[in-house]
Image (tube, helix red, strand yellow):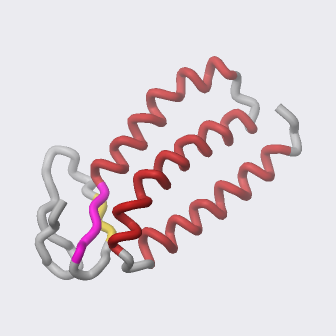
Amino acid sequence: MRQDLFPVLAAVWILFGAAGGLLFYVSKNVKFKKKYFPWFVMLAGVLALCLALGMGFSVGMLFFMLPFVTLVVILNIKLTKFCDHCGSTIINQMWSTNVESCAKCGAKLND
C-alpha cells in the first residue's frame, strides 16, 4: 500500500467519528438515527478494514480480522437503542440483559 494513503485514511476516520458523534449522540432526531445508524456502523467497519490495509496489513490479515469486525458491527447495531421521547442514544453495555427504559428520561424504549 502507498505510504501517503495512511494519513488520508486516518483523517477520514477522525472526521467520520466526529460526524457520527454529532449525528448519533448530540442530535435528537430519532427517526434519522434509527434509519441510518446501522448503515453508519457498517461503513465504520469497512473503513476500519481500509485503515488496516493502509497501515500495511496483508490481505490475509484482513480476512482474519473480518469476523471480529463483523461481530463488533453486529453488537453495535444490536446493543444501541434510541429513546423516542428524548432522543437519547442508549448503549447497552450488559450483553445478557435488555435495556427497557431510557437512562436520561425514564421513558419506555419501543425497540
Which quadrant holds the C terminus? bottom left
The residue located at (38%, 61%) in the rendering is 35
Residue furthest toward the top? 60
Q: Quadrant of residue 103?
A: bottom left
- Give the mark count: 0
Query: Who's the residue at 48% across and 46% down the image?
Result: 42
Whether residue 68 sits left or right of residue 111 in the image: it is: right
Determine if the magenta segment contains residue 50. no
Q: Quadrant of the N terminus?
A: top right
Q: Provide residue 18's location: percent of width, then percent of height.
A: 58, 68
Residue 79 horizontal/vertical position (percent): 28, 52
Q: Position of residue 50 (x, y in %)?
A: 67, 39
Q: Seen in the image, is 87 located left or right of residue 100?
A: right
Q: In the visual, does 68 lie left or right of 103?
A: right
* Percent position of residue 63, x then y: 56, 22
Q: Is residue 55 above or below residue 95?
A: above
On screen, 110 above or below 57? below
Q: What is the magenta segment's predominant secondary structure?
A: strand
- Residue in view at x 19 percent, y 72 percent: 102
Left or right of 29? Residue 58 is right
- Stretch in magenta: 80-84
Residue ID at (46%, 52%) = 39
Answer above or below: position of 26 versus 24: below
Question: Quadrant of residue 86 in the image?
Answer: bottom left
